[in-house]
Amino acid sequence: MIPEIGHFSLIIGLAFAFVLATVPLFGNHHKHTALMQLAVPAAVGQFLFLALSFGCLLYSFTVDDFSVKYVADNSNTQLPMIFKVSATWGAHEGSLLLWAWILTGWALAVSLFSKTLPLSLQSKMLSVLGMVTIGFILFILLTSNPFERLLEIPQEGRSLNPLLQDIGLAIHPPVLYMGYVGMAVTFAFAIAVLLEGKFEMAWARWAKTWAIVAWAFLTLGISLGSWWAYYELGWGGWWFWDPVENASLLPWIIATALIHSLSITASRGSFQSWTLLLAILAFSLSLLGVFLVRSGVITSVHAFATDPTRGIYILVFLVVVVGASLSLYASHAHKVTQRKEFSLLSKDTLLLLNNVILVTMMATVLLGTLYPLILDALGVAKLSVGAPYFNSVMLPLTVPLALLMGLGFATHWREDSSKRLLSRLWLPAVASLLVAFLVPLLLLPDVSGLAILGLLMSSWIAFTALIWLLKENSTGLVKPNMQKFGSALAHIGFAVTLTGITITSIYSIEKDVRLEPGQSYQINEYQFKFIGVQQKQVDNYLASEGHIKVFIDDKLLTELYPQKRTYMSQVMPMTEAGIDAELSRDLFVALGEKLDETAWSVRIQYKPFIRWIWLGSILMAIGGVLTLFQRRKKVKPENANVAEVNA
Amino acid sequence: MNKQMIPLAIFSALVIFLAIGLTLDPKDVPSPLIGKPAANFNLQKLYSDETFSPNELKGEPWILNIWASWCVSCRQEHQLFVDLAKEQLITIVGLNYKDTPAEAKAWLKELGNPYQVTVQDPNGQAGIDWGVYGVPETFVMDSQGIIRYKFTGPLTKKRIKQILLPLLSELKDNKTQVK
């Protein structure tokens, strides 16, 4: 009964989405206020019914209702409760339902918090969100119904993929989806603005808030995924340039560009059409990600079990959504564009340049991701593009990005003089040169050109951001300007991530060794002593648990317990690394194969600064959110050409 | 051309590639097992308590179809196997992968049973030896027990006509020559 209620709620949700997609738009056309205002109850309705639907699926998991095919395929009675809950979104159907629910959640939030926008814009935006919701609910109902019943009810379910039985991955998809789907808000905004035919600066400020929230979720979601891959896959890598990882990186890059472009539009009243294009692009890339992950066109460790009809559906959906919005853009964008003079040396130019670099980055990642598909489609070759391509194209793009980022902090809007700039920049320049040369010389094992370059970039960003903050925030700690503080923090976060990437890529040590109980292996000052391996029975898996003591100068530092787990109803063993984490380095031990009666192969890794990668992304997200706590400024006049006071 | 048309143009080109990509199978890479002797197994039959091993088939070409009742694409290709079985061109062995006998039997009852023999691999143990990374997969063995081709994903009419049937007639010819 409960699954049927869930299924039925989903259909009612669809009905609400239809109302949301059509009635406000119709009302808008006929200038009928009551019809436009219907958007709010419709948004509430679709949210509540999707919540109910999702709740029903969740309930079926918690009570082990194996008559539901999706539950039987992804859960069993031995699964701990937390993973029964997370199994709800552990595979295609349920994760799509979660996606749709989150989408209605964003629509609800928009309907509640867009009072500052004119009703016509608000109702158009909600209608667009309603249309997108229709697309996703239909996708679920037509191709991926999670409530499908089995005729013969199995005694026991098939169990969730053991890789997914992990707390990091239990929360990774919801956070990531919040980000992905959040891009729908700025997308709907862009479409509404294009339909409206004008773009006011205050609206851009509104949109920026939403872009930042979605971006912060995306940032956290991506780094959660990276962190999970690091400790769960057992290879010690943190980013694999896997198509599915790329699918999350693409909208992130564009969302980053979008936030900056929105901030130009909001404070200078220019770059409107560029901003709108980025907003459309960010969500289009989210949808492209859905297509890549769920259609089976690309092989990836993450890809869901696929079914050809799904791929066709998403492709058609993609064509309708992106095709229609880009056509609208092509025909309407000229209406909203305003040109504002700015000199070559100004914050405007630098932000624009960095936007161009970010879009180029997106294009290169997209190309690398789709290249195997394109060559295959042309019948030329079968190949895969790996990390070497991405690393070699991203580095030359990151260098100017970092350089311009620092310059951007020191320049004013509209125009600036090189003399003034120099007076502001010599301090961070000298400081970052010092860091870049002294740190490798004094603290790192050897001096590498790439390390100097990486540290130069990150310290340049951090120092310019810091000095900008001190200057701009001269009123001091009494009344800190949260917006500026947040902005500086987010950029410093980026610098922290960059530092982590640089150092861990260059100075990591990775050894695969054969160890007998009692034997030791030395890496730097760390002595890894292999004690032995024990068998353990835990919940729903069997584990071979290694025991390794780590000493520095014969003093016990820590004990690590890497595991190899064999889950019920699964053959492939799972690796659970033993990790000792510190801010400046990780010690990472993974159990390999059993070589003979007593000896095991053990993978030992020394990963300097790897924590900085994720720490930086947390700072970025926090910084982004802090910028939202700005004190309310007075509402600006309608025709806000006087707004160049920001500098 | 209006510069605001550019994104639309790029997107259109992209869609064409995505659409073609959808018709292709990225997993359709030449299997390293092709040209190697097929891995042996000794598994219980679905409809009796006896076991079955590929060794019993030495001397004739055969097909191994790996399927499961929970696999949607298997349902798609199944009718093609039923048709193929009617023509009696080749021995078709079904390997029921990570499934329960009850569900497997119900499935075959519903859709028809094209297999001379169906064996059960409830843990996927044999699947590992055969390098299975998703159902359905279909292997073609020659009379020497060498793997000659591997289909990843569901068979289609096109794949049968273009790849499977020519291969089968080639295998038949070889067999007569050997004799």
Image (cartoon, coloured by chain):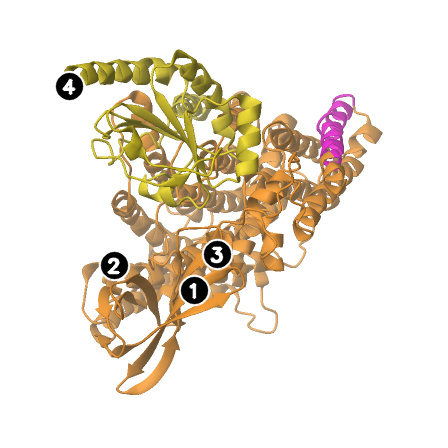
Badge 2 local density, few (<14 within 10 Å), some, or many (20+)? some
Task: Look at mark 2 in the image and give the residue it sits on.
Answer: A453
Task: Look at mark 1 in the image and give the residue it sits on.
Answer: A543
- Circle 4 chain: B
Mark 4 or 1, closer to the camera:
4
Q: Is residue A560 left or right of A392 when viewed as pictured?
A: right
- Report the magenta residues as a range: A8-30
Distance in Å between CA atoms under marks 4 and 1: 51 Å
Q: Are marks 4 and 2 on the same chain?
A: no
- At numbered mark 3, what does the secondary structure look like: helix, strand or loop? helix
Nearest the eye: A273 or A377 = A377
- Disc 3 marks a residue whose amino acid type is Leu
Task: Look at mark 4 in the image and give the residue it sits on.
Answer: B178
Residue at coordinates 41% horizontally, 16% vertically from top-left?
Answer: B84
Chain shown in orange:
A
Q: Are marks 2 and 1 on the same chain?
A: yes
- At numbered mark 1, what does the secondary structure look like: helix, strand or loop? strand
- Disc 1 marks a residue whose amino acid type is Ala
- Circle 3 chain: A
Nearest the eye: B78 or B172 = B172
Res A448 → quadrant:
bottom left
Q: Residue A465: x percent and y percent?
A: 43, 62
- Circle 1 chain: A
Res A303 → quadrant:
top left
Mark 2 or 1, closer to the camera:
1
Indicate whether residue A615 is drawn in magenta.
no
Indicate whether residue A29 is drawn in magenta.
yes
